[in-house]
Amino acid sequence: MSDYVVIARFDEETDEKITHLRELLTDAGYPVSQWPPHITLAAYENFDEKLLRAWTSKFSSRHKKISVALASLSVFPPGGGQTETAVLCLNPAHSKSLVDFYYEFHARYDEYCTGIGWFYSLSFGNPVIHATIGTIRVNELQKAMELVFSSGVFRSAEMIALEVYTYPARLIQRFALK
C-alpha cells in the first residue's frame, strides 16, 4: 500500500504552452510545479496500486478525450505553516462534461482520498478542479500573474490521457482516452 496520484494530461500543444510558461516563470525566479502539465483528478493514501491501475484503465477505455477551456487563474491562499506563499493555478472552465468526468472517476475508491487527496475528494464537497502552476510568494503574485497573462496559456485544450503516479512524482502507467 502506497500513495498515488491520478492526473489528466493535455494535448501536445497545450503541454508545450504550459511548459513554456513554466520556463518563463523559472527564468523570473519563481518556483514551479515539477509535475508534467496536468489537471489532478485524485490523490490516494494507503491504496492498492493494482486496484487503482485497473480502475483507471477501465475508466479510460470508456471515456473520450475531453475538450476544456483553460479560462482563468485561481490562488489557493497561504495555509498551515506557510504564511508567505500561495499556490497559483490555471483553471479549466467547469463544463458539465468535465465535472461529470471528474465526479464519475471518484465514484470508486473516493474513501482513499484522504490527507494528500482530501481537497480532490467528493467527501470534501467542493473540489476545485485546477492545474497547479507554482507556489509563489504572496507579495510577488501580481508579477507572476502578469507573466501568465502574456503567455498564451488561456486556450481551448484537450485532456487526452490519464496517468497514475506514485507520490511524489514517478509515472507508473499512462491510459489514453478514446
Image (cartoon, rainbow, N blue to C red):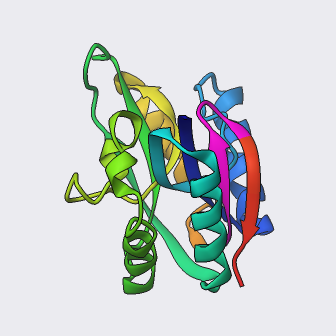
Q: Which of 86 and 139 is in front in this view?
A: 86
Q: Provide residue 19's location: percent of width, then percent of height.
A: 73, 48
User: Looking at the picture, does residue 108 appear above or below residue 28?
Assistant: below
Question: Across the whole image, how many numbered discs are drawn on residues?
Answer: 0
At 23% from the left and 55% from the top, the residue drawn is 123
At 71% from the left and 28% from the top, the residue drawn is 27
Q: Please identify the residue farthest to the left as the structure is shown.
A: 125
- Magenta stretch contains residue 139: no
Residue 80 in view of the camera: yes
Q: Provide residue 111's location: percent of width, then percent of height.
A: 32, 51
Quarter location, residue 103: bottom left
- Magenta stretch contains residue 167: yes
Q: Quadrant of the N terminus?
A: top right
Residue 150 in view of the camera: no
Quarter location, residue 2: top right
Q: Please identify the residue farthest to the top as the structure is shown.
A: 81
Q: Nearer the viewer, residue 4 or 91?
A: 4
User: Looking at the picture, does residue 86 appear above or below residue 110?
Assistant: above
Q: Give the range drawn in magenta.
A: 157-170
At 44% from the left and 85% from the top, the residue drawn is 97
User: Looking at the picture, does residue 121 appear above or below residue 24?
Assistant: below
Q: In which quarter of the image is the C terminus?
A: bottom right
Q: In this view, does 172 lie to the left or right of 108?
A: right
At 53% from the left and 76% from the top, the residue drawn is 68
Q: Provide residue 174's location: percent of width, then percent of height.
A: 75, 59
Quarter location, residue 16: bottom right
Prevalent SS, magenta region: strand
Q: Nearer the viewer, residue 63 or 112?
A: 112
User: Looking at the picture, does residue 63 appear above or below residue 29?
Assistant: below
Q: Provide residue 32's location: percent of width, then percent of height.
A: 60, 32
